[in-house]
Amino acid sequence: MDFKGKKVMVAGMAKSGLASARLLLEIGAEAVLYDMKTAEQFPAGTFSEFEGRAKLALGADAEATAKDCDALVLSPGIPTDLGFIAQARADGKPVIGEIELGFAYSQAEFVAITGTNGKTTTTALSGEIFKNAGFCTHVLGNIGIPIAGEALKTKKGDIVVAETAALQLDTIDTYRPHACAVLNVTEDHLNRYITMENYTAAKERIFKNQTPGDYCVLNYDNDITRGMAGRPKSKVIWFSRKVPLQSGVFIEEGRIISREQDGAHVICRPEEIKIPGLHNLENALAAVALARCYGIAESVIKDTLMTFPGVEHRIEFVRELDGVRYINDSKGTNPDATEKAAAAMTRPTVIILGGYDKKSSFVSLFQGFGPQIKCVVAIGQTQGKILSDAKAAGFKDIVTADGFEEAVIKARAIAKDGWNVLLSPACASYDMFSDFEQRGRVFKDIVSAF
């Protein structure tokens, strides 16, 4: 794939699109920057670096713009069934996503991580392990740094540890990680994929280009990922928090074990892992498996697991005030993620739930709450659905708030000395915020101002 001298439409002008445009210009392509929004709807100066270097088609007709181009590069938020995309494919034009573009122009070897939950933590943790093992490591992708933005900086021998979401996998072509992991698959993004079968198929694309010399790490404890056995052409490495395995990464006699062809390698005890929660133990097991694919020493893995502090917006302690601990889990964007965050709470807890509607059900979330969950404050576009699902599940301790700040204030008023207030919305943020990161920062700002 060589776009030098080609006229390429970049669709979607968020982080990924801007990074794609910069890469295309650097390799000598003609970039056409398209977004359904006009220039006036973006922050001032967003496109100043492209003046005189690229064509701006902001707010322009998408079909006319695409017709005039040789290829399309899509940002992950762009639905792939739009008319101008279908027409471009019918015309035989290459249609790829930002991660495919970045992969094509990178010299590094890729370690890719996908799954409904745990991607960001596992990516960040794996990146630390590879760095501590001496690899020149780039932690990129859905974690917040576009692959296209760093691709030309990579060298042979480097490692890219890439968080890879389903929406990004929709538009790959040659993307091939040497080692990949599918952490879990639970209900999410059904507004885009409609069925779990479609969503699962999108996740499976992470290993579609792998060969027998590559590795695919799968979660033995998740029914859907366990059902993927036999589909990858690569060597499958299992991990399990619940059962000992004949081979793979698991827990036995209070120790994390990686059982390989040359025997059992002891990593550490689960309680030595710094990040809390059973879900983070699962993330750690996956990271161990990926590291052992590269033969990284047990001592390096252990030291990293014992010191890695976690990531922002994922069960992140903010402050304690009047005996109440405030915890930011804005990255909890689906019910399964929130259920895991709730299970990690060791004190009575008030949870703030709600946000953008991805057509998820919250019934099982309420049914899965333990006795430590004392009250829910419901907000956002999904507020009505949360109320009805709470009723269906028999959960009665729920109140509503008209806005985000009001929700935090109400949660503070409900919480008692020795309790937690947990922001873990089980929803995306787009009804009130630009992304989960902004939502988490606003939460921390409100709490810090108390």
Image: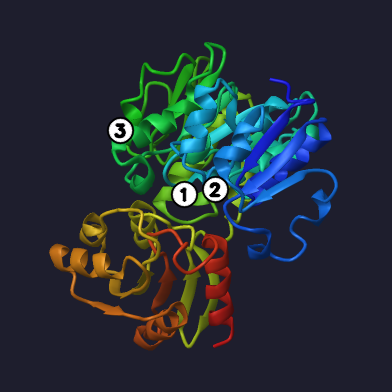
* Snapshot quadrant of residue 267: top right
Badge 2 local density, few (<14 within 10 Å), some, or many (20+)? many
Find the distance from the CA under tag 2 to the CA under tag 3: 23 Å
- Residue type at the position of mark 1: Asn
210 on left or right of 408: right
Residue 197 is marked as 3
Q: Indicate the amino acid at tag 3.
A: Glu
* Res. 266 visible in picture: no
Of pointers 1 and 2, the one earlier in the residue sequence? 2
Q: Secondary structure at mark 2?
A: helix
Q: Is residue 57 visible?
A: yes
Q: Position of residue 3 (x, y in %)?
A: 73, 25
User: Of 83 and 285, which appears nearest the observer?
Assistant: 83
Front label number (3 vs 1): 3
As drawn, 442 above or below 31: below
Mark 2 is on which residue type? Thr
